[in-house]
Image (cartoon, rainbow, N blue to C red):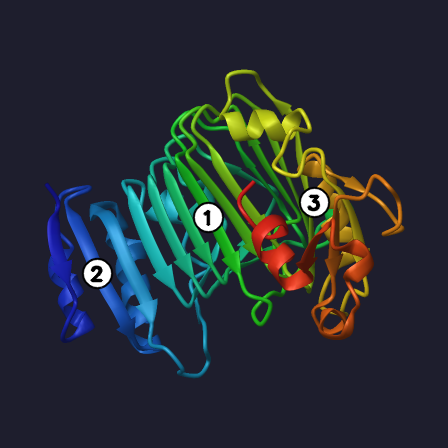
Amino acid sequence: MAKQVIISDSIEQVWSLKDELPASVSLEATDITHEDLNTLAQFIQAHGACLSSLNASLQDSVKPYHHDWQVINFIEMCPNLTSLTLGLIDVNDSVLLHPSIQNLTLNGLHIHADNHIHIKPALERAMLEDVNVFLKDTAENADWARNPAIFAESPNLKAFEYYLDEDYAESAPDKFYFENCPQLESVVLCIHGGGWDVQLKGLFPKLEFGACSRRFGFHGIDVSGVADGSHPSLIKLRDGDGHLNGEVIVFLHPTRHFVVEKAKQAVRLLGGTIAENPDDPDVTMIVIGDEAYKTWDETPYEHLEIVRESEFKNADIEAWY
């Protein structure tokens, strides 16, 4: 079992670990200064092989707000890592390409990638929160601008969660591919900015899946390649048999915060049909803007289900599929 070391006083105590055996130390150095992180980086560059686990973060609300560790190649300098947690420390894509990391938690930082990212088979759980990913500007990547794609084809991946608030969104991956991940139990993509797509292909017998992009983002979902034997909810999506199957929905008086085209796309994915006129005899549901609902006369449509857009969005669109 690795030795647990928590840096609580001087960062200089880290040098006492320089003679430890490979993969023998679990190190925690959180909420520390830029100067301390510089010292820790020097230790990692010289003796990172001793680490099996690392948890490091910059103090909150100090300028500059991010520390730069792009010089650290975790694959080469920390070859024995199985767990990595970083906060407010900008890094290169070695954190996602590491061949032995099983648990990865990243918060409030930037990843600078040389190429599109292919997650390695060892990774079991990834949690990214307020993480921007930038693709290096090269001729090879020109068609993708600065937005990389993330590919996951792993027998061990169990959970992948990515949360990016609109206030922090600068550059997120524009494509997420999950293919033949039989252990995958949870994919949550809540990226509230830009446009992005997710594709599921192959067998996912355990997977529950959620996605949202709110009013400042737009996302697409492709489940056409989901294989028989996958989770029943995915099979229903693939076959157009989601929880809106049989519903014919018309949108009336949407507010500017409600992205109608995204809502229509989600309705179709969930098995529903779009109508343009509430007087269409096939209509079963009217989704109406919150403000318009206050003064709208629903008497002619009392036989239909009337749903305010905020309730509909929260319950049916930005939700688990």
Residue 184 visible? The answer is: yes
Q: Residue at x 78, y 61 (%)?
A: 299
Q: Nearer the viewer, residue 287 or 318?
A: 287
Q: Amino acid at mark 2?
A: Glu
Task: Work out whether 256 lies above or below 177.
Answer: below
Q: CA distance from mark 1 to mark 2?
A: 23 Å
Question: Where's residue 309, x and y in %?
Answer: 68, 61
Query: Which label's residue is closer to the chain start, 2 or 3?
Result: 2
Question: Where's residue 313, x and y in %?
Answer: 63, 56
Residue 140 visible? The answer is: no
Q: Amino acid at mark 1?
A: Glu
On the image, numbered disc 1 is attached to which residue? 161
On the image, numbered disc 2 is attached to which residue? 28
What is the number of the mark on residue 266?
Answer: 3
Question: Where's residue 75, x and y in %?
Answer: 39, 43
Q: Amino acid at mark 3?
A: Ala
Q: CA distance from mark 2 to mark 3?
A: 43 Å
